[in-house]
Structure formats: structure tokens, C-alpha cells
């Protein structure tokens, strides 16, 4: 009701009783709420707090506020009841105000242009949002869906409130693991090194991410029992790091030949991974852009904002960037040492962020390599400086809670007070039902991770099947594949976003694909249904002019319930932006869809579009409001809408 509350509050502020006591619209809005029983009124103004401030008794204040009446539109009656002032609203005027607000904000034909619920709180402010952020040389597994979709949705939601949001895909493309990968590739695929040595820029040929991952896993296994292999892995990584340092250094120091080989292998592995990630993201309707462009050959970093930034949903900035370019990591480490924030411990450099008796943050490992933490600290400094951001948020699973607590504390210890405005946007696990009837973390019977692509493909195939059974005409149309994709992927996405992000997501195929429950397909279906009624109206009465629909004809309680739901949406969106919580938007849509469905049943006999043209148009106006708000909300959740299903 936020939208209505604000309008009602300003109307009340003009009433003699309120004006005489100097109660302004804002103060009034704060004390308006829905009474416990609808018989009491549509809204109630609570006098407790204002009475205290004005030094009066609440019932006395309620009576005083009800006196005199200037012209009113939204409020019909003021009735003092003890410490409350109950309001009866002019429902037709309220409905008309809400519907007009939706119509004005959603004038265009395409959902992506609909703006209902937009706010200004973030105007002129920048949020750097770290999301998705997978590791290269590993396929995307189901748990990557969560960071990707929660993150993308938060990006859209914050943008709706005026924020500039810079999406950063913090690619895990650096660390000692890549030494093992390179050692494994050299060991098991002798051609690879030969090709890299000969200057081939694609030394890995047609290798897939899956193969890279298997190579790493095999070497990792074997090196656990073989110290010589383990040492080889460390060596390969050291070569890679030294090569890059040499490339970036001012001296014309020639990079070591072996380092060049490793560099080429690493670069190609990253390229292969990015190509596969992009293919994967495309299933979700997303795309990222590699940035900044590091031109190692000319020792330059091209950091102008590329046009691509505005087209892509975010930028890939690999962890390697902070190590290889501008020497961000080394400078950070030097700073931590000089300021005595970091100290030596068993050959490593650490920061005690939580006191001496708790494990410290590892800054530099005992073999001299930079750590995940060091790269994250350098990344934060870079983001603050380069994007001049007001806030930073990291959409990363709850298992990294300690990592982020340590990160923020270490930054503060170095004097960066803004680290207090960094947030870890944590989330729960994806759980799957196992054959033994228990819920377990995303893994199959064999104990291997479930690939995201397999899961999405399965969802799309299931929807394709349902369409073939229930709607053979549609199945035969050229749109069928796009629709199956939008509904199938949307089903998985909605299932992910509908509950508070900190909860674990129980992935149960029946619930995910349920066309009746609180599911993606159901939300899509409600949207489609609103479109079909509109088409039906058009056939019978011609092109509707929604503004001409007379809200006074919307007299059913079910219709008032929908108006209230529509009025709730802007508040839900604002709170979702504040709390970085997409489920608040999903919840508002679920409630709206439920209200719409109840209305559908209630109008079974008279129909939405029936014999009375005026009533039909009034109802169609409400249909249009529902459709626009559903469309806007689902788009904010990163779902692709369909016109039929
Ligand atoms: N690559 C990491 C992983 O897969 C997630 C990175 C999250 N972002 C960050 N700035 N640490 O676990």
C-alpha cells in the first residue's frame, strides 16, 4: 500500500484537523497501517507516537484530528476509535490512482521498458556488485546458478532505484591450482607443451573445460602421493608468475622461455573457459565482457569504459588482473607489511583479523604466492578507486562467511574505513533429493557435481514435453522452442529466487515445474492469461483505452484486494533493493498472482470480458495492471517472458 499511503498521507495533511496540529505527510504516513479487522476500516492512523510528541492523550488527539473536512478524494471517512483514527477509503478513487500510476510508468509495449516501482534513492550512487565469479578450467555446476541469478536480479533491482551498478564477474583465474593444471597438461598431453613452445596461441587445441578439469583433478590426486609431482606443480606456477612479472616490469628482461609456454597454456585455458561460460550464460540470457583489456605486449592496460560495458550485464575481471597488471597485489602487500598490519608466520605473511587466538587471514603463502585474500583485497582497492563506488557487495555462498569478515576487517585495519560499507550477500545451498529420500548438497549418486547445463536442459525438455501433451498446436509452431526455453529456464530461476536467499534451495522437479503452485511456470502462465483476456477484449470491443476504464465499477472485494497488491509492489521493490533480497519481489508477485486467481474464480459467471462493455473495460484495466506488474517483476528477477504457453 506504500504508493497509496503516500498519496493518502498528503491528502490528510491538508485536512483542517491535521493541518492545525502541523502534522505533515511524512509523519502521517509513518503511522498509517492496516487495521487488524477489515470492518474497522481500510487503514488506521495510530495516535500513540504523535500524541506523545504533542503532549496529548491519544484518544483526544484522534478526536481532534477528525474535526472539519476539506475536500477529499481518496479518503471517504475519518472515524475516531480510541487511540486510533480509522479511515474508510474511496476505493474507486484509490483504484483509479493506483492503476493510473501503473499505466503511466508502463506505457511502452515491452516489459523491459516498464518502470512501475522505480525509486530515486540510489541516484548519483554506485554499487560494485561481485556476482557469479566462477573458477576457470572448471565447468559451471548448479551452485553457480545461485550467485549468478541472485546477483543479476539484485543488479536489476538496485538499478530500478536509481543506482549505477557495476557488475563484476571476479573470475577465479589465478592461484597455485593453475600450476597443477599446467603440470598435468604437460604430463598427460605432451603435444601441448610442444605447440606452446612453437608459439601456437591455441596450444590446447579443441580441449573442453571438462577435459581441463579432469586433467587438474587427476594431477591433483596423483601429486598427493608424490612429492616430486607436487613440487613440479609449484614450479610451474612460479614460472607463470615470474613470466608475467617480467612482462609487466619496465626492464626489458626477457621472459623465460618456459614461462612463456606456461603463459600461453594458461591464456588458452582461460579463453576456452570463457567461451564455455558465455554459452552457459546465454541460456540464462546473460553475457559478460572481459575487462580491462590488458595488453601485456605493450605493457599497457586499457581501462577506458568500453561501450561493451553498457551492453553486457557485467565485466569479467580475472583475479589475475590484480597480480599481473599495475602490480596492485604487491603494492597492497608492501603496504600491509610497512604499516605492520601483516606479520610473518611460519614463512607466510598473515593478518590477525579476529585476535591472536583465531586463525589469521593468509596474505602471502609460504611459497611466496599471492593468496585468494590478497587478490580480493587488491580487487576491493581497485574497485573503490576505479569505479568511485559508494557501496560494494559480494554475492557469494554462506560457506565463505569467514573469508569476507576477514577481508573487510583487514581492509579497515589498513585504514580503509569504507570497508564498513562492503557487504557479503550470502546465500544457502542447492539441495537435491537423493534416492535414499534424504536431501543432500548438489551431487549425484556418483558423487560428481551436477552440471548447470544438464539441469537447464532437463528443465527445458520437461517443459517441451508438457507443451506437446497439453497444447499440440503450440508445440508445432515455430515459437515452441523459445517458449520451452523461457519457461524451463524460468522455472529453475524462480525456484531459486522465491525464498529468502539465506535458505537452502530444495530442488524438487515436481515443484519446480508445477503449473499450479508457487512456481515459475505458474507466474508465466498468469502473465500469459492476462494477455489472452486482453486479446479477447480486443476481438470483441476493439483496442482498449485503459484510462477510460471506470474504476468505480470494480466493486468486488477481490478487485480491491488486487488493487492493494498492486499498490504494495513499489514498497516491496524498495525493500528488496535495501536488503539485497530478490525474494521480496518474488513474494509480491506470488501474492499478486494468488489474488488474481481468486478474482478469476469470483468472476466465473459474469466473466472478465462479458456482455457489459463498461464493466468489461473496467476489469480489463485491472487485468492490464496485473499483467504489467507481473511482467515488470519477473523481468527484474531475470526471467524471460512469453506471450503464449
Ligand atoms: N571464485 C570463487 C569461487 O568459486 C568465488 C569468488 C567470489 N568473489 C570474490 N570476490 N571472492 O568460490
Image (cartoon, grey):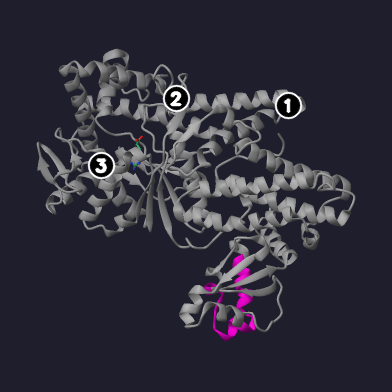
Assess mark 1: CB under 8 A from ligand 1?
A: no
Residue farthest along the bottom direction in this orientation = 20
Question: Element under label 1?
Answer: helix
The reply, left or right, for residue 286 in relation to residue 598 is left
Main secondary structure of the magenta stretch: helix
Quarter of the image for the N terminus: give it.
bottom right
Residue 16 inside the magenta-drawn segment = yes
Residue at image mark 2: 438
Q: Position of residue 3 (x, y in %)?
A: 61, 63
Residue at image mark 3: 373
Q: Are marks 3 and 2 in contact (CB under 8 Å)?
A: no
Q: Position of residue 340 (x, y in %)?
A: 12, 52
| Ligand 1 visible in quadrant | top left
Q: Are marks 3 and 1 in contact (CB under 8 Å)?
A: no
The reply, left or right, for residue 97 in relation to residue 250 is right
Instruction: Say whether disc 3 or disc 1 marks the residue closer to the N-terminus.
Output: 3
Res. 127 mark: none
Q: What is the spatial separation of the Cα atoms under label 3 and label 1, in whole angstroms?
A: 53 Å
Question: Element under label 3?
Answer: helix
Labels 3, 2: front one: 2
Q: Which residues are magenta?
A: 5-27
The reply, left or right, for residue 534 in relation to residue 142 is right
Instruction: Say whether disc 3 or disc 2 marks the residue closer to the N-terminus.
Output: 3
Question: Element under label 2?
Answer: loop
Question: What residue lies at 64% left-to-right and 51% top-to-bottom?
Answer: 629
Residue farthest along the front direction in this orientation = 82
**Is residue 304 or residue 38 the one in the foreground?**
38
Question: What residue lies at 46% left-to-right and 78% top-to-bottom?
Answer: 52
Residue farthest along the right direction in this orientation = 611
Amino acid at each position: 500500500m506504500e504508493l497509496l499511503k503516500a498519496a493518502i498521507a498528503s491528502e490528510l495533511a491538508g485536512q483542517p484537523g491535521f493541518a492545525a496540529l502541523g502534522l505533515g505527510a511524512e509523519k502521517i504516513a509513518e503511522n498509517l497501517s492496516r487495521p487488524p479487522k477489515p470492518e474497522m476500516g481500510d487503514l488506521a492512523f495510530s495516535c500513540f507516537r504523535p500524541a506523545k510528541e504533542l503532549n496529548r492523550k491519544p484518544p483526544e488527539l484522534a478526536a481532534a484530528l477528525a474535526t472539519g473536512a476539506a475536500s477529499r478524494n481518496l479518503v471517504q471517512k475519518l472515524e475516531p476509535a480510541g487511540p486510533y483514527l480509522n479511515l474508510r477509503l474511496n476505493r474507486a478513487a484509490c483504484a483509479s490512482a493506483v492503476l493510473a500510476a501503473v499505466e503511466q510508468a508502463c506505457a511502452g509495449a515491452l516489459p523491459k521498458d516498464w518502470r512501475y516501482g522505480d525509486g530515486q534513492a540510489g541516484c548519483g550512487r554506485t554499487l560494485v556488485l561481485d556476482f557469479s565469479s566462477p573458477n576457470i578450467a572448471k565447468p559451471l555446476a548448479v551452485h553457480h546458478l545461485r550467485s549468478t541469478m541472485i546477483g543479476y536480479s539484485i543488479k536489476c533491482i538496485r538499478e530500478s532505484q536509481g543506482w549505477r551498478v557495476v557488475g563484476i564477474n571476479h573470475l577465479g583465474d589465478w592461484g597455485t591450482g593453475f600450476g597443477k593444471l599446467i603440470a598435468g597438461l604437460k604430463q598427460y598431453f605432451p603435444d601441448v607443451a610442444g605447440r606452446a613452445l612453437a608459439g601456437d596461441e591455441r596450444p590446447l587445441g579443441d580441449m573442453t573445460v571438462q577435459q581441463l578439469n579432469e586433467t587438474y583433478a587427476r594431477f591433483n590426486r596423483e601429486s598427493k602421493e608424490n612429492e616430486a609431482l607436487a613440487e613440479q606443480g609449484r614450479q610451474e606456477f612460479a614460472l607463470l608468475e615470474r613470466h608475467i612479472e617480467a612482462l609487466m616490469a619496465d626492464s626489458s628482461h626477457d621472459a623465460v622461455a618456459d614461462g612463456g609456454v606456461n603463459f600461453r597454456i594458461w591464456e588458452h585455458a582461460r579463453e576456452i573457459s570463457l567461451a564455455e561460460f558465455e554459452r552457459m550464460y546465454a541460456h540464462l540470457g546473460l553475457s559478460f565482457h572481459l575487462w580491462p583489456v590488458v595488453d601485456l605486449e605493450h605493457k599497457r592496460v586499457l581501462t577506458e569504459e568500453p561501450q561493451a560495458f553498457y551492453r553486457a550485464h557485467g565485466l569479467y575481471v580475472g583475479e589475475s588482473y590484480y597480480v599481473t597488471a599495475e602490480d596492485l597485489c604487491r603494492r597492497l602487500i608492501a603496504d600491509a607489511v610497512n604499516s605492520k598490519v601483516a606479520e610473518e608466520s611460519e614463512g607466510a605473511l598473515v593478518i590477525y583479523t579476529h585476535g591472536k587466538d583465531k586463525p589469521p587471514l593468509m596474505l602471502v603463502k609460504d611459497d611466496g604466492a599471492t593468496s585468494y585474500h590478497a587478490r580480493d583485497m587488491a580487487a576491493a582497492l581497485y574497485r573503490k578507486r576505479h569505479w568511485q563506488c559508494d557501496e560494494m557487495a559480494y554475492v557469494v555462498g554462506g560457506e565463505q562467511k569467514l573469508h569476507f569478515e576477514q577481508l573487510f576487517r583487514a581492509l579497515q585495519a589498513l585504514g580503509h574505513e569504507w570497508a564498513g560499507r562492503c557487504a557479503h550477500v550470502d546465500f544457502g545451498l542447492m539441495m537435491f533429493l537423493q534416492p535414499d529420500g534424504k536431501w543432500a548438497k548438489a551431487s549425484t549418486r556418483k558423487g560428481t557435481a551436477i552440471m548447470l547445463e544438464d539441469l537447464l536442459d532437463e528443465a527445458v525438455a520437461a517443459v517441451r514435453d508438457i507443451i506437446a501433451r497439453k497444447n499440440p498446436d503450440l508445440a508445432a509452431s515455430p515459437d515452441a522452442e523459445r517458449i520451452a526455453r523461457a519457461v524451463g529456464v524460468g522455472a529453475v530461476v524462480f525456484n531459486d529466487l522465491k525464498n529468502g536467499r539465506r535458505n537452502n534451495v530444495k530442488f524438487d522437479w515436481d515443484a519446480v515445474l508445477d503449473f499450479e503452485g508457487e512456481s515459475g511456470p505458474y507466474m508465466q502462465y498468469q502473465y500469459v492469461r492476462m494477455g489472452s483476456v486482453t486479446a479477447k477484449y480486443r476481438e470483441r470491443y476493439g483496442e482498449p483505452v485503459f484510462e477510460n476504464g471506470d474504476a468505480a465499477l470494480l466493486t468486488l472485494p477481490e478487485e480491491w484486494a488486487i488493487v492493494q497488491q498492486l499498490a504494495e509492489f513499489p514498497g516491496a521493490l524498495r525493500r528488496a533493493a535495501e536488503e539485497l533480497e530478490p525474494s521480496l519481489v518474488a513474494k509480491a508477485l506470488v501474492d499478486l498472482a494468488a489474488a488474481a486467481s481468486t478474482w478469476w474464480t469470483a468472476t466465473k459467471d459474469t466473466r472478465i470480458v462479458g456482455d457489459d462493455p463498461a464493466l468489461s473495460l473496467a476489469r480489463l484495466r485491472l487485468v492490464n495492471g496485473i499483467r504489467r506488474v507481473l511482467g515488470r517483476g519477473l523481468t527484474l528477477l531475470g526471467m524471460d517472458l512469453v506471450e503464449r504457453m
